Amino acid sequence: MKSLIVHAAAGLTASGLLIALPAWAQSAATYYPNKPIRMIVPVAPGGGGDITTRVIAAKLGERWGQQIIVDNRAGAGGIVGLEILARAAPDGYTIAQGGVGPVAVTPSLHTKLPYDPLKDFAPIMRAATALNVLVVHPSLPVQSVKDLIAHARANPNKLNFGSSGPGRADHLAGELFNMLAGVRMQHVPYKGGAPAMTDLVAGNLQLIFATVSTAAAHMKTGRIRTIANTSAKRSDLFPDLPTIAEAGLPGFAIDNWYSFVAPAGTPKAIVDKLNVEMTRALNLPDVKERLHVLGIVPFPTASPEEFRSYLAAEIQKYAKLIKAVGIKAD
């Protein structure tokens, strides 16, 4: 009889905990955040994803009266930083910026990726899209996409294109260009777009499919030459700049986007709160203006669930592209 009473009490306690958990999570969200938040950026400082994160972090810090610490953990095309996130406590106090590369492309590039984007992360939002442009060193004797194709065909394996890391949008753009144009340019990966741009300006690279945020300052000074943009449509930021597709390579289109994710198991109420507050920050006029001049357009998903569906579709899309291009990181 005593045993039955003990088991019954245990069952009631377990049931009570199950009922209390959602209430606890909601309460945690009410008082969240009550200490500093760490925002991991898996690339070097200075690129589009880093800038977007810092702009949002500043607004969240003002809003919440808490310190938002931006922590750059570059390496392996974003994998280093996101592996740290996957192992972090799921309490909302460690989140990460994830570009299209490390969260949507790397699952098809690596056979032993230390995280699964859909299982190990709680998607918060796709935050923005970023314009990438094809830029070359002025010493390269090309003025157009057709010129570049002709020069690359005449000089196989002699042109180097830099990227912010394996599997990132600028890397995929170069590989897609190779495939569609029937040329062979060599990929040189960096720990972010900024160090790659430094080497381009120095003449150690011939070209980059760079974000405008990384290239803008040098575009104005003439230290690099802008040839085309990588998107499917022209940008209102550079209306006279043709797309690569219309300038000589039909079928070419690579889009770049930035997102935010938390460790799997982070309370839904906290994830929802992050989505709402980040959306509010991205819709502020001064944030839109700051990002627009860098070719970054706020494009927040309406909910974490919408971003999860979008991410799953992007993973499938890039799996097909990587198979067609024939690249593998390991």
Image (spheres, rainbow, N blue to C red):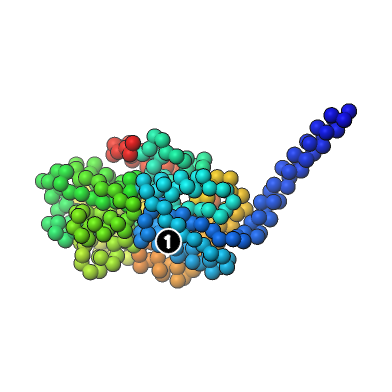
Q: Position of residue 159 (x, y in %)?
A: 17, 49
Q: Position of residue 130 (x, y in %)?
A: 37, 58
- The structure residue drawn at horizontal position 25% and vertical position 65%, both measured from the top left corner, is 219
- The structure residue drawn at horizontal position 40% and vertical position 59%, both measured from the top left corner, is 50
The front one of 253 and 273 is: 273
Q: Mark 1, residues whose alpha carbon is within 10 Å: few (<14), some, or many (≥20)?
A: many
Q: Position of residue 136 (x, y in %)?
A: 20, 57
- Please give the residue where the numbered disc 1 appears in the rendered image: 52
Res. 232 in view: no
Q: Is residue 153 left or right of residue 257?
A: left
Q: Is residue 293 left or right of residue 3?
A: left
Question: Which quadrant of the rendered structure holds the C terminus?
Answer: top left
**Label 1 is placed on what type of residue?**
Thr
Q: Position of residue 324 (x, y in %)?
A: 30, 37
Res. 195 in view: yes
Q: Which quarter of the figure has residue 143?
A: bottom left
Question: Which quadrant of the rendered structure holds the N terminus?
Answer: top right
Q: Is residue 42 left or right of residue 63?
A: left
Q: SS for tag 1?
A: helix
- The structure residue drawn at horizontal position 53% and vertical position 48%, both measured from the top left corner, is 88
- The structure residue drawn at horizontal position 51% and vertical position 62%, both measured from the top left corner, is 68
Q: Is residue 280 above or below residue 270?
A: below
Q: In the current view of this chain or complex, which residue is farthest to the left?
A: 154
